[in-house]
Image (cartoon, rainbow, N blue to C red):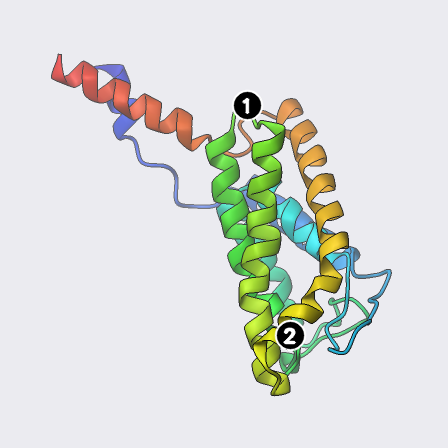
């Protein structure tokens, strides 16, 4: 068995290192800190506009799917326990059940996974336009797909009303996508390997398979 074959067959580590845990904690704190400016409620539906979605996007684009998911999960767990870490000093289990914005919180968890996974496919090059598309897909489309129906259900509204009202988030969320990609691009230049590249890993596995066959 060659060295390349052994490398290709070596599974990715499943445990989180101390460094990983520190990064998760830091990004959970970042998302919480982005709620300090408060929230802005406009439109007919009482779902606030906050900066915290920016932190969620950054968690996926900088940490990747796994660590980004745990960072968001850590924050939401603390909120569910009653800590006022959502924008406007909100906290408690009610924000995950009957609140109009409950679906968006669940959408954060799915969105950060999508952003992190797609980012790992883009690395190590992290092309600008592809990164913008990946971040918008996870940070806007996926989050809205979960958030809008839950808003409609919790408020007893037709889904099209909740969908139209969600348009108020788009301008700010598009700016957050751009900021996320610009920040993540610089981070990945300065710290290559922060997110393992799936493309590179697949290439290594293919090389190992060819070597074995030879």
Quarter of the figure that contains the N terminus: top left
Is residue 1 visible in the rendered image? The answer is no
Residue 162 at x, y = what percent?
A: 64, 74
Q: In the visual, does 159 lie left or right of 58?
A: left
Q: In the visual, does 160 lie left or right of 30?
A: left
Quarter of the figure that contains the C terminus: top left
The residue most toward the bottom is 156
User: Badge 2: few (under 14), some or many (20 or more) residues near its Cα, within 10 Å?
Assistant: many
Is residue 151 visible in the rendered image? The answer is yes
Q: Residue at x 47, y 43 (%)?
A: 117
User: Badge 1: few (under 14), some or many (20 or more) residues near its Cα, within 10 Å?
Assistant: few
- Viewer-side residue, 128 vs 119: 128
- Viewer-side residue, 14 vs 159: 159
Q: Residue at x 66, y 30 (%)?
A: 185
Q: Secondary structure at mark 1?
A: loop
- Viewer-side residue, 20 vs 190: 190
Residue denoted by label 2 = 162
Q: Secondary structure at mark 2?
A: helix
């Amino acid at each position: 068995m060659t060295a390349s074959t052994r490398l290709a067959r070596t599974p990715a580590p499943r445990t989180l290192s101390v460094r990983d845990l520190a990064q998760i904690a830091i990004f959970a704190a970042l998302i919480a800190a982005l709620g300090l400016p408060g929230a802005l409620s406009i439109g007919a539906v009482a779902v606030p506009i906050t900066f915290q979605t920016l932190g969620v996007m950054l968690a996926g684009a900088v940490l990747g799917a796994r660590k980004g998911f745990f960072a968001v999960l850590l924050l939401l767990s603390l909120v569910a326990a009653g800590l006022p870490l959502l924008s406007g000093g909100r906290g408690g289990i009610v924000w995950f059940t009957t609140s109009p914005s409950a679906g968006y919180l669940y959408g954060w968890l799915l969105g950060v996974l999508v952003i992190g996974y797609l980012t790992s496919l883009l690395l190590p090059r992290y092309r600008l336009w592809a990164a913008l598309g990946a971040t918008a897909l996870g940070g806007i489309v996926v989050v809205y797909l979960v958030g809008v129906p839950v808003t409609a259900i919790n408020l007893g509204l037709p889904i099209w009303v909740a969908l139209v009202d969600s348009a108020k988030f788009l301008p700010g969320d598009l700016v957050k996508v751009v900021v996320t990609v610009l920040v993540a691009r610089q981070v990945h230049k300065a710290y290559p390997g922060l997110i393992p590249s799936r493309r590179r890993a697949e290439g290594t596995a293919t090389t190992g398979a060819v070597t074995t066959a030879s």
